Image: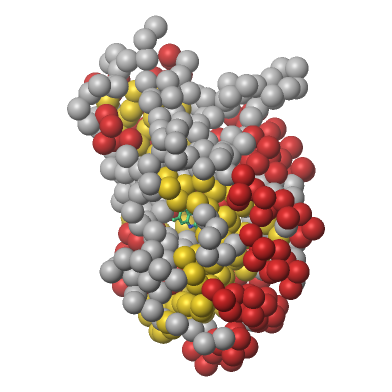
């Protein structure tokens, strides 16, 4: 049997594309260029019915199924698989009466922020509003409002899911509670999510921005950040990025070509309380640039100022139980003006560390910090692809503070291994995820992801 469309094109509203078709390559375009892929067939889904048809088609032909929204999180190539792209299905509907939003699989956070703002409401978006809201949430979702309101996954009310048998299902705390637990933090291994209802928070404005210090002051700044971080109220989130800014006109003159320690502050409380909490950080050194201000919550993306142009990256990440001055010293032995990578340290804690009313599968909930090391390179080619060794060497030296693995959303790029995914969950959580996967997707149809593999009948892993 061929992988080709057969009568699939007649059963979906969106395009069905094969290798060589006009539109096939553009349909695959996404943010992360590191993972090249060649699916057997691509379905540009316009909604849940297209997803049902695509999953059934894949089932009839024994094809694996991959899903892509924005391509910010591609880790496994959908080679020879059926890839469902969701960007056409991006509706967002806000219900102010119960402070929720329902959104389709292709919706990005900027759209949800935009639609919620007129009601004085906001979602628990991440640092980069161009990221897809569904996948971000399936992976937990660590945002700058998280210390006050928890992971994005903690605020899901309902999921519309097409499971491996091609059946559309409503998944809530009462309907298929095992799937509801697994999908919220366990990722895309359990089905294709076509819709998601999330709780919004009452928030119109935030206070925050960046304090860009000279890299030479990184030690004092990071030490002060850790000290401040121990006591700040949960309405405040702190993080830092160590990086050399490119010498380009688009970069503020004070930062061009400079090695910097970019401290980021976000507060959903009053400016005065925030300033009191970060006074020690401000005293640590003199910033080259200070962008801290009151802003509409729709501008939350300006705080981290993550890149928005597609790029290839090699990344490694680790959650830490704790951090102290020795942790800072260890990081600074690797990071510096000549390091190929940037290093990000995000503070966790607060509501992130509390299991929600309806528990979910988010791993490393009790960690204190998340460290993310990433190298961008121009184009994936045999000559230019970094092997990830320098990034891993830094994480290896952070062993004494390790919480055993990374938050799954921070496992990015082509170097993610099965062991990395397993280490993103505590052992009991992992076992439960594998049980649920085995019940719902015993053939591992959904394996183009941070894969939770099922057991086969002998109790061992089904190969992906
Ligand atoms: C610049 C940048 C900033 C980021 N900031 C944060 C942050 O602040 N906090 C955080 O927690 N994470 C963050 N991330 C990580 C991000 O949340 C994940 O990479 C996420 O998976 C991206 O989702 P996407 O839909 O945009 O990407 P895609 O590459 O389109 O999707 C990633 C994977 O999700 C799965 N998937 C996508 N859609 C569905 C669906 N409808 N049903 C089932 N599975 C699906 C597929 O396996 C797919 O391969 C960031 C990533 C980048 C590149």
* 309 or 252: nearer the viewer: 252
Image-based side of 384 in relation to 273, left or right: left
Q: Residue furthest front?
A: 338
The outermost residue toward the right is 400
Foreground residue among 20 and 17: 20
Identify the residue at horizontal 62%, vertical 21% (top origin). 463
Image side of residue 245 versus residue 420, left or right: left
Image position, residue 116 (x, y; %):
36, 67
Q: Is residue 35 visible?
A: no
- Classify 20 as above or below 127: above
Q: Quadrant of residue 71?
A: top left
* Picture layout, residue 118 above or below residue 32: below
Residue at 65 percent of width and 41 percent of height: 420
Q: Quadrant of the N terminus?
A: top left
Image quadrant containing the C terminus: top right
Q: Position of residue 238 (x, y in %)?
A: 57, 74
Of residues 5 and 167, the one nearer the viewer is 5
- Residue for point 64% across, 34% down: 418
**Residue 101 seen in this snapshot:** yes
> Tag count in the figure?
0
Vertical order, 21 against 416 (above or below): above
Q: How far across and down, in percent of the image, does residue 357 sit?
A: 65, 60
The coloring applied to the image is secondary structure
Name the residue: 69% across, 80% down.
Answer: 227
Residue farthest to the left, as pictured: 22
**x and y percentages locating residue 235 in the rendered image:** 57, 78
Q: Is residue 438 left or right of residue 55?
A: right
Compared to residue 143, the image places residue 253 above or below, namely below
């Amino acid at each position: 049997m061929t992988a080709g469309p057969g009568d699939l094109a007649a059963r979906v509203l969106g395009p069905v594309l094969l290798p060589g078709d006009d539109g096939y390559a553009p349909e695959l375009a996404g943010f992360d260029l590191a993972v090249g892929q060649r699916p057997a067939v691509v379905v540009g889904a316009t909604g849940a019915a297209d997803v049902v048809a695509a999953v059934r088609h894949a089932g009839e032909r024994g094809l694996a199924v991959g899903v892509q929204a924005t391509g910010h999180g591609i880790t496994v190539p959908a080679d020879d698989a059926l890839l469902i792209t969701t960007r056409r299905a991006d509706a967002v509907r806000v219900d102010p009466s119960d402070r929720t939003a329902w959104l389709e699989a292709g919706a990005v956070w900027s759209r949800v922020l935009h639609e919620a703002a007129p009601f004085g409401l906001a979602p628990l978006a991440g640092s980069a509003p161009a990221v897809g809201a569904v996948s971000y949430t399936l992976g937990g979702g660590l945002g700058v409002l998280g210390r006050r309101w928890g992971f994005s996954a903690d605020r899901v009310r309902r999921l519309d899911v097409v499971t491996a048998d091609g059946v559309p299902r409503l998944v809530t705390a009462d309907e298929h509670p095992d799937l509801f637990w697994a999908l919220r933090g366990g990722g895309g291994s359990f089905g294709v999510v076509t819709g998601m209802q999330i709780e919004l928070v009452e928030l119109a404005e935030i206070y925050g921005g960046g304090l860009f210090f000279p890299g030479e002051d990184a030690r004092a700044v990071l030490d002060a950040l850790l000290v401040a971080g121990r006591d700040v109220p949960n309405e405040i989130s702190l993080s830092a990025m160590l990086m050399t800014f490119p010498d380009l006109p688009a970069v503020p003159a004070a930062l061009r070509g400079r090695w910097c320690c970019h401290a980021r502050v976000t507060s959903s409380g009053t400016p005065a309380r925030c300033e009191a909490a970060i006074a020690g950080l401000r005293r640590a050194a003199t910033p080259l640039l200070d962008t801290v201000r009151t802003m509409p919550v729709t501008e939350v993306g300006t705080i981290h100022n993550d890149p928005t142009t597609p790029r290839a990256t090699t990344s490694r990440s680790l959650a830490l139980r704790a951090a102290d001055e020795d942790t800072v010293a260890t990081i600074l032995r690797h990071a510096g003006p000549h390091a190929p990578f940037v290093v990000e340290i995000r503070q966790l804690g607060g509501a992130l560390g509390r299991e929600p009313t309806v528990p979910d599968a988010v791993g490393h909930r009790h960690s204190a910090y998340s460290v993310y090391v990433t190298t961008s390179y121009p184009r994936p080619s045999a000559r230019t692809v970094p092997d990830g060794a320098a990034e891993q060497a830094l994480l290896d030296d952070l062993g004494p503070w390790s919480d055993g693995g990374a938050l799954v959303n921070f496992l990015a790029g082509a170097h993610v291994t099965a062991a990395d995914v397993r280490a993103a969950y505590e052992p009991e959580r992992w076992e439960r995820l594998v049980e649920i996967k085995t019940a719902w997707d015993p053939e591992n149809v959904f394996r183009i992801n941070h894969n939770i593999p099922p057991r086969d009948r002998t109790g061992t892993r089904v190969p992906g």
